[in-house]
């Protein structure tokens, strides 16, 4: 399914504009809270069957737990370059998205439909995709994950300029802002 072609992309992590050498299959970090456990397990099994290297960062059961713990783990793996992409699952996907985006260098997006997933990769260079277990069927999640992993960022031009501006917001002095 995947070629042996290596892709060179720019990753915006702790060290800005660090070059990563992506290979297919990819190294993927995955995590969920208790409410996303079943869909996470499904996605993990599908990705492993496709030949990806999947690092499951928890949770490992359906006991109640806190989603920011797992969003942080996945985001840090991606930003550090130990995973090319990250996948997260919780009840709505929104909490995971918000928590992951608190990690400098993370660009998490909520998976809603195939077109939005495609555009968030092509135009926003999302490196983490969050899913809602409550509102996403397993086959929909598989299709969205496939698009997320297979789509390249359109580097250069207006999209790259906009991503640079977005990432620069992480370094703004919040005390200097005016109301």
Image: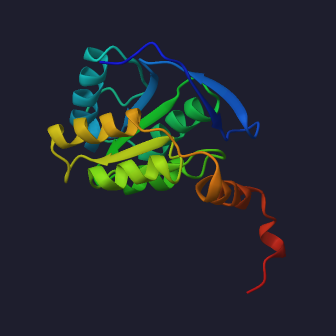
Q: Image point 35% across, 56% down: which residue?
A: 116
Q: Residue at the spot x=48%, y=38% of the render?
A: 152
- In the picture provided, is 172 more to the left or to the right than 110? right
- Please give the name of the residue rendered at 38% of the width and 57% of the height, measured from the top-left corner: 94
Does residue 156 appear left or right of residue 115 in this picture? right
User: Hey, which residue is sitting farthest bottom in the picture?
Assistant: 179
Residue 159 sits in quarter:
bottom right
Q: Is residue 167 above or below residue 66?
A: below
Q: Position of residue 51 (x, y in %)?
A: 33, 13
Say if 76 sits above or below 51 in the image.
Answer: below
Look at the image and tell me in which quarter the C terminus lies. bottom right
Q: Quadrant of the N terminus?
A: top left
Q: Nearer the viewer, residue 54 or 123?
A: 123
Residue 132 image point, x, y percent: 27, 50
Nearer the observer, 119 or 141: 119
Query: Who's the residue at 21% across and 34% down the image?
Result: 38
The answer to whether 36 is drawn above or below residue 22 in the figure is below
**Residue 110 visible:** no
Q: Using the rendered image of the protein, determine whether residue 8 is visible from the camera's viewpoint.
A: yes
Residue 6, horizontal then vertical, whole percent: 53, 19
């Amino acid at each position: 399914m995947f070629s042996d072609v290596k892709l060179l992309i720019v990753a915006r992590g702790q060290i800005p504009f660090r070059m990563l050498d992506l290979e297919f299959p990819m190294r993927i970090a995955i995590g969920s809270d208790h409410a996303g456990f079943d869909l996470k397990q499904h996605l993990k099994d599908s990705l492993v069957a496709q030949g990806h290297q999947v690092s499951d960062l928890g949770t490992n059961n359906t006991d109640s737990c806190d989603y920011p713990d797992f969003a942080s783990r996945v985001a840090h793996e991606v930003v550090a370059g130990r995973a090319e992409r990250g996948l997260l699952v919780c009840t709505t996907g929104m909490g995971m998205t918000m928590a992951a985006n608190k990690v400098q260098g993370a660009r998490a997006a909520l998976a809603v439909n195939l077109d939005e997933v495609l555009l968030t990769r092509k135009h926003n260079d999302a490196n983490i995709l969050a899913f809602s277990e409550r509102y996403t069927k397993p086959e929909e999640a598989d299709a969205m994950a496939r698009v997320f992993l297979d789509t390249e960022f359109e580097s250069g031009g207006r999209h790259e300029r906009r991503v640079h501006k977005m990432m620069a917001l992480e370094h703004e002095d919040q005390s200097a802002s005016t109301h």
